[in-house]
Image (cartoon, rainbow, N blue to C red):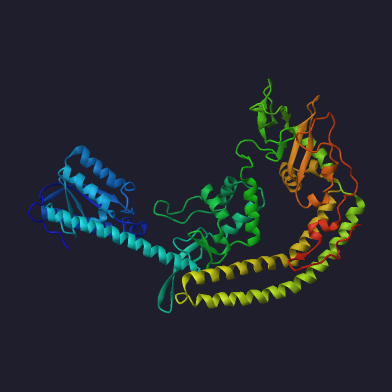
Amino acid sequence: MNAEPVDGAKSGGRAVVYLRVSSQGQVDTDYDPEGNSIPAQRKACERKAQELGFEIVEEYVDPGRSGMEVKNRPAFQEMMARIRNQKDIDCVIVYARSRIHRNATDAGLTRRELKQLGVSLVSVRDFTDDSEVGDMVGTILDAVNEYQSRASGADIAYKMEAKAKRGGTPGRAKLGYINMIEEVDGRNIRTVKTDPERRSFIPLIFEMFATGEYSTPQLRDAVTRLGLRSRPTKQHPAGRPISNHKIDQVLRDRYYLGHVTYKGREYPGRHVALVSQVVFDRVQALLETRTGAGTRQRVYDHPLKSGLSCGRCGGRIYLDRGKNQRGVVYFYFICLGIRDRSCDLPRLRAEQVDVAVADHFTTLQLGKSFITATRSAIEAGMKDAAKLGQQMRRKLRKERARIAEQRSQLLDLVGNWPQDLLDAKMSDLSDQLVRIDGELESTDSAPVIEAGKAVNTLLELLDDPRGLYRSLTDKGKRRFVQACFAKLYVNADEHTEAPFIERDELRPPFTPLLGGYEKRQRRESPLASTSSSKATCSNGDPLVELRGFEPLTFSMPWKRATNCAKAP
């Protein structure tokens, strides 16, 4: 209904105009930076002001702001503050009541405040009157506007969820993808395709992080130097560097595996996956180990940083810097327990700890007979793995094709079956596909062969692990220590304060290989009494059989090859 001034309505005086659109998408619809809607609202408000004899003294614009809450609309807040403080406004002109409010409660509060200040509200499209009838009509219109907003929101949410269930991507495409409109059988279908300019950066981000050589800030700087920028926006037409937070989001997002998550539920997506499950899992494992690890690479760095624990109290040890009277800078390791005097481990010079770690690597040295027998078993194991893997892959691929066909048939039933039953069945089939994909991956003989080669190389390197450690760069030392040990517990001689490694926590495959090592250690816990000598260990053959060494026995849930697992 067009507004017509009736008895009781003000005319003439000073007015302000308030303009608003709900989303940024309504702004970005024309060559004009304001889009189409705001200029159209402005023109209609100017005509109404001229018709009623008002002089427009100010204009307030909230582009891309929801009408449900006033607290997120800076222009509206500024307008109300001006009306309260300067008291020089007679009228607020809007294109429609829905432009100033989509919330009946806020609308009522604003209407009452404007009336107390002697300011009338004029709508170009809606009935406007300062009488009791006008108040009643305004209240009804405000309630209808709120209902329409909420109903529209619920309808959009339902459609977005339905789209996710069918594998579509609700909302804006993620980094590495772009939104597109495809014409299919005369219909415009909104879909997502890979971004030709940015897609190659996504696997690169994952692969670089999976090396363990990059922190999030370092990774962000590296890909920025390689040319990665965000998609163009009005404020940044050429794009801008990706933030550290965005890099972290990308590394954790299962969307890049080909999945769509909506309201906490995951669905198989129609978009192209940019990252393999193997690389994604490796990245997640690395992120997990870094969470709370205490490594702040922007301060001081050292190859043993965050890998040491206190041999006396079991607490964390951190790296700090000192300077002597001659101004020479040196680094040392300190137990956190010193702060509250719960531990008496002295400060340990970093270079002395490095020597202690090198000496400790002699405990990883393996016997010659063990190495020979292991190499023979690896060769037999790789042959068995290849043969068994081929058989299992044929069966798994056949089963996967059957389940995929079932899921495809269920998608055709969307709208005919009860939604909860369809969701449950789809979820079950998706779980089966994920499980089979995992089993297919585990039956691939290539990783087994690569693992065998890696173990052979490892055996060669472990012929002299101490010498290998001392020959490495700082980066190489860090990776070697992280590959062998989950933790190293450092202590100090009670007389000389010389550091030594009291005990360790081995990583696979060293745990089964050297399982008897901890039993042979002289100090069995970090709380044991100290001694003036370093912990020693026999360098003889380990006391575990080869079947404890994972790469030597290829296994599936229903079958295991054990003919290659024989003790020397």
**Which residue is painted at 53% across and 67% down in the image?**
269
**Residue 128, relative to residue 343: is it above or below?**
below
Whether residue 466 is visible: no
Which is more toward the observer, 300 or 417? 417
**Residue 534 as seen in the image, left or right of residue 433:** right
Residue closer to the observer: 229 or 498: 498
Residue found farthest to the bottom:
185
510 vs 171, left or right, is right
Can residue 367 be seen here? yes
The mark total stands at: 0
In which quadrant will I find the C terminus?
bottom right
Image coords of residue 23 (percent x, y): 35, 57
Percent across and percent down for residue 517 are: 84, 45
On screen, residue 341 above or below 465: above
Residue at the limit of the structure toward the left, as seen here: 7
Q: Is residue 340 left or right of residue 265?
A: right
Residue 482 image position (x, y, % from top left): 72, 46
Q: Is residue 11 shown above or below 40?
A: above
The residue positioned 47% from the left and 56% from the top of the image is: 231
Which residue corresponds to the image point at 47% horizontal and 73% vertical from the top-left?
A: 418
535 lies left or right of 12: right
Q: Quadrant of the N terminus?
A: bottom left
Q: Position of residue 374 (x, y in %)?
A: 87, 57
